[in-house]
Every structure is written in structure tokens, then in C-alpha cells.
Amino acid sequence: MDRLKRRLAVTFIMMAAAGAAFAAGMPPAGGGPGWRGRGGPLKGALASLNLSADQQAKVQALLAQEQPQFAALREQAQSAREALKATMQAPTPDPAAVGSAMLKVKAARQAVRAEMTKVHDAIVPILTPEQAAAFKGYIQALKDMRGRWRGHGHGAGAPPLG
């Protein structure tokens, strides 16, 4: 459970950092765009596209507009995780209560993913067709890697399930 909490915390921190760093116009850190650089994967994806000044301004405005929604989702997810932790740490945890709390954590995670997809979909029209294709490929590659890292075997090149 601690691994799940850490992963969720890192995801939320990276999204907040990506939005804040990109909105501030910070250059990529960590030796180039990518997962480990300051701002996370979204920042890395955008940095690799060589956006024009107009595109950068539009994306920055979009990310600034979405910050309150991401903050609310982070708060929701934090509350759900804390409730799950409290439920599981009871002397005799109620399985139904644990299941309900886990479903709330899952719903919070899905809400974050939906919001991330919404932001990605809003960025695409700002890009040229070539940039959009590269952006979509970059995001898909990150999703594929995340699936492999989590051992789900859903990433490209992963062995088939079953």
C-alpha cells in the first residue's frame, strides 16, 4: 500500500510541477526533456516539440487554467488515500469499508487520468500536425513504459497476457 501511495504522490507532484514549471517558462532540467527532468513527462514532451512563442503562450494559458482543477483532484486523492489508510489501520478492518475506500482511491486516480487526457487533448489543436504526431507518440510511449514498470505487461514489446 505504501508503494501505491508513493506512486500517487509522485504522479500528483509531477503534474503540479509540470504545470507550474511550464507556466513559468522554465527550461528543461536534468539534461534534456523526459521523465526525470524538472516538470515531469508533460514538460519533457512539450520541450521536445520546439514550440513557437505563440504556441508556448497558448499552452501556458491552458495549463494555468487547469491548475485549480488539478489542485482539487490532488486534494480529493489525498483525502481518499488518507481514508483508506485509516480504514486499513483499524484494529479489525472491515473488508467492505476497505473495499469502498479502495474504490474511492481508484476513482480519484481515474479522475486525474481523465483530466490529464483532457489537457493532452486540448494541447493537440495548438500544435502543427507534425508536432501533434510527435506529442501523441511521446505520451503513448510514456503510457507503455508505465504499464511495463508496473508489471502489467501492457506496454509495447511486453509479453502477451495469458
Image: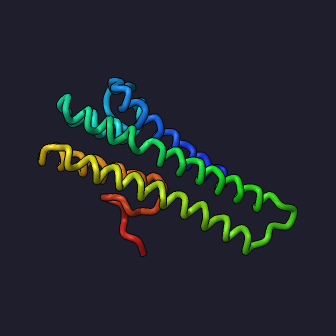
**Depth check: 134 or 110 in front?**
110
What percent of the width, then of the height, locates residue 135? 24, 46
What percent of the width, then of the height, locates residue 157? 31, 58
Q: Is residue 127 left or right of residue 97?
A: left
Question: From where the camera sits, is residue 35 visible?
Answer: no
Residue 162 location, quadrant: bottom left
Residue 126 location, quadrant: top left
What percent of the width, then of the height, locates residue 53? 20, 28
Q: Quadrant of the N terminus?
A: bottom right
Q: Is residue 120 left or right of residue 36?
A: left
Identified at 25% across, 33% down, the residue is: 56
Identified at 52% across, 39% down, the residue is: 13
Outermost residue toward the left in this view: 129
Q: Is residue 68 above or below residue 113?
A: above
Q: Is residue 115 above or below residue 49?
A: below
What percent of the width, then of the height, locates residue 102? 64, 65
Q: Is residue 116 above or below residue 154?
A: above
Outermost residue toward the right in this view: 91
Q: Is residue 4 left or right of residue 41?
A: right
Question: From where the camera sits, is residue 88 visible?
Answer: yes
Identified at 32% across, 35% down, the residue is: 60
Q: How many marks?
A: 0
**Depth check: 71 or 150 in front?**
71
Q: Is residue 47 above or below residue 133?
A: above
Identified at 39% across, 38% down, the residue is: 64
**Depth check: 157 or 91 in front?**
91
**Depth check: 6 or 27 in front?**
27
